[in-house]
Image (spheres, rainbow, N blue to C red):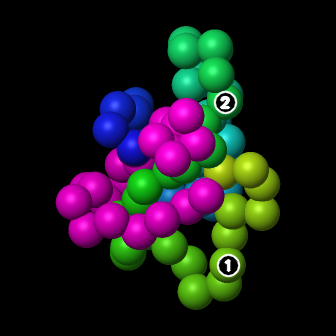
Amino acid sequence: MDTGMLWFDNDPKVELDAKITRAADYYRKKFGQAPNLCLVNPAMLPKEKQGKGKIEIRPSAIILPNHMWIGVDKKEI
């Protein structure tokens, strides 16, 4: 992904999947395209697997905690 949308969500009561769903809904409305990749800080990933939907969740050390970089993977374009 070369270009994406940076999303901040520090609500401790909401699980990561729900945060990504919120970000994806906004992305879809803003850009008219569904995202398929979300980069998150490795500390945000729970021990059990998440991301059952169409969005791949990848850890990235360059992403700050509580932030998500969401967009379309360039190999899918």
Q: Earlier in the sequence, mark 1 or mark 2?
A: 2
Could you tell me the amino acid type at mark 1? Lys
Q: Can residue 52 be seen in this view?
A: yes
In-image side of 53 versus 8 (left or right): right
The residue at which mark 2 appears reads as 34
Give the mark toward the camera: 1 or 2. 2
Could you tell me the amino acid type at mark 2? Ala
For label 2, the SS is loop
Question: Taking 28 as reference, is 46 above or below it?
Answer: below
> Residue at 32% of width from left, 38% of height from top?
2
Q: Which of 68 and 75 is in front in this view?
A: 75
> Residue at 66% of width from left, 30% of height from top?
34
Magenta residues? 56-77
Q: Do the residues labelled 1 and 2 touch (CB within 8 Å)?
A: no
> Residue at 25% of width from left, 68% of height from top?
61
How many residues crowd around disc 1 within 10 Å: few (fewer than 14), some, or many (20 or more)? few
Q: Residue 57's x, y, as percent?
A: 55, 61
In the image, which disc is placed on residue 49? 1
Question: Taking 69 as reference, is 58 above or below it?
Answer: below
Q: How far apart are marks 1 and 2 (CA)?
A: 22 Å
